[in-house]
Image: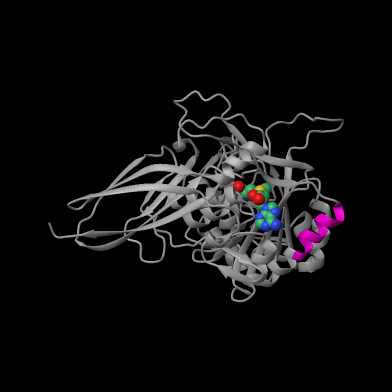
Amino acid sequence: MFLGDNRQVLAYLLNGYQKSIDLIYIDPPFSSNRDYNKSIKLKNTDLDIGYTFVEEKQYNDKWKLEEYLQFMYERLQIMKELLSEKGSIFLHLDWRMDSYLRVMLDEIFKPDNFINRIVWKATNSSKSQTKGLGKQHNSILWYAKDKDSMTWNQVYRPPTKEYKARFTYNDNDGRGLYQTVPLVARGVQNTPNRKSFEFNGVVDKWLYSKEKLEEWWEDNRIHETRGGNYRKKVYLKDCDGPPVSDIWVDKGVAPIQKEAYPTQKPESLLERIIELASDEGNIVGDFFCGSGTTLSVAEKLNRRWIGADINKVAVQTTRDRILNLNSEVDFKVSTVSTNKLYNDVENESGLKPTVNLKTKLVNKELTINVVDFYSPELIEKLQEQQQDVEIQDFIQVISSVHIDFNYKGTFNPTYIQTDKIEKEIQHSYQNSGNYQVAIQLSDILGHEVLRVIKVDINED
Ligand SMILES: C[S@@+](CC[C@H](N)C(=O)[O-])C[C@H]1O[C@@H](n2cnc3c(N)ncnc32)[C@H](O)[C@@H]1O
């Protein structure tokens, strides 16, 4: 997981991840000509503290067209280098930039590697703000690194009532309800090089081989219509639902009603994409990861993942989201600067928060008390924004506490609190020994402080 400009992150990854990423999904700024803010609430709502918000700018989405195109071009080119031979990329945009980027992707990936322009219903509101029709959809452009080697799995929509209602026939042979589908080529399938042959006395351009048709006929899987035509029986029990096409308006991928992070996408949308174009164990990348939807779904679906975002709150949200899913996941948050990697976020400029901790050890029981926490950058932000906020209790500005009670150099927190922050935390050790305890606290804008303390547990 990287905190920083993805241009540098991508360039850094060229050193070890060239041709290794199997699926990239990105949901970059749409050039929407607005700034996205997230309301950040001071914690501990028991206290009535009047103004409880700081508006921390999440990201700016105001561009000149040529700047936007240059920004995307540089990044997409490197992403192509990072994709494996079986890899593909999904680029999520809306009406503003989708056509420009379609042309750009044709240039970078070549028109033959175009797979689909997916239309996703991004909002339930169909009303237009101006003249013209309501803009309800986003476009997701899908390109393969190499169409012939690309990973792809057919995905099905959950069967709807209307879909099930199409299965009306029943032979009472235990196979249940079925519908029928054509066996002969018509319309686009009726290509000039398709040959006619005879089956059951009918000469036509059959879609399947004569052997297959005879096998199905023997097995009572071919339906004869009143007009004497043959159609294939398709049983409801064998159908997962209608195959997903390039129009995604079904409830299975409904837009989020209330976003926790601005422009957050639904997990179900990412589930569909990840299942379509990757397999378990594959590497999934999202270099505009926001709140970490892609990475969190990748983790759930047993994919490996790489993520980046330039925004601290985004990275913090992603980190907490993944750790809440599984606190054992082994990952680091790193920053990249001019092609050098920093393995923790310690090396950044700016003033870090300070924390005052007191610890008490009784037998094998460790108690950690958070006595004070002060974040100079947060206070500065509040003042900059002339927010007349009086912080009555320092606990209100702490957004998360992560503790690794047996820290050995790699931070693997087993205590994760992002909701109700406690000032007193207890932990029982099973075995005696010399331990290091790493305690990381973050303020509500994502500024972090890490403290490591030593604890010696004796036998009695
Ligand atoms: C549309 S949001 C992504 C939302 C995400 N799909 C989700 O479900 O939460 C775009 C993200 O791109 C990030 N971003 C913008 N420019 C960036 C850059 N140059 N490098 C890395 N991240 C960037 C923003 O901070 C923002 O979080």
Residue occupying the point 58% across, 47% down: 313
The color scheme shown is one colour
Compare residues 209 and 277 and report the one nearer the observer: 277
Q: Is residue 226 above or below residue 188?
A: above
Q: Main secondary structure of the magenta part?
A: helix
The quarter in which the N terminus is drawn is bottom right
* Magenta-colored span: 65-74
Picture residue at 53% right of the left edge, 42% below the top: 444
Asked whether 349 or 344 is in front, the reply is 349
**Residue 432, image quadrant:** bottom left
**Residue 455 x/y as whole percent:** 27, 58
Foreground residue among 244 and 23: 23
386 to 334, vertically: above or below: above
Q: Based on the displayed image, in which of its 4 quarters is residue 130 positioned?
A: top right
Task: Give the number of callouts.
Answer: 0
Tell me the residue at 62%/76% (across/down): 15
Residue 250 location (% of width, % of height)? 62, 40
Q: Is residue 268 visible?
A: yes
Q: In the current view of this chain or complex, which residue is farthest to the left?
A: 460
Is 47 located above or below residue 266 in the figure? above
Horizontal side of residue 52 vs 147, given as left or right: left
* Residue shown at the point (51%, 62%) measured from the top left: 344
In the rendered image, the quadrant that contains the C terminus is bottom left
* Magenta stretch: includes residue 97: no
Is residue 246 found left or right of 157 in the rendered image?
A: right
x, y percent for residue 201: 67, 60
Does the rendering let one see residue 196?
no
Query: Does residue 70 show up magenta in the picture?
Result: yes
Percent x, y of residue 348:
58, 59
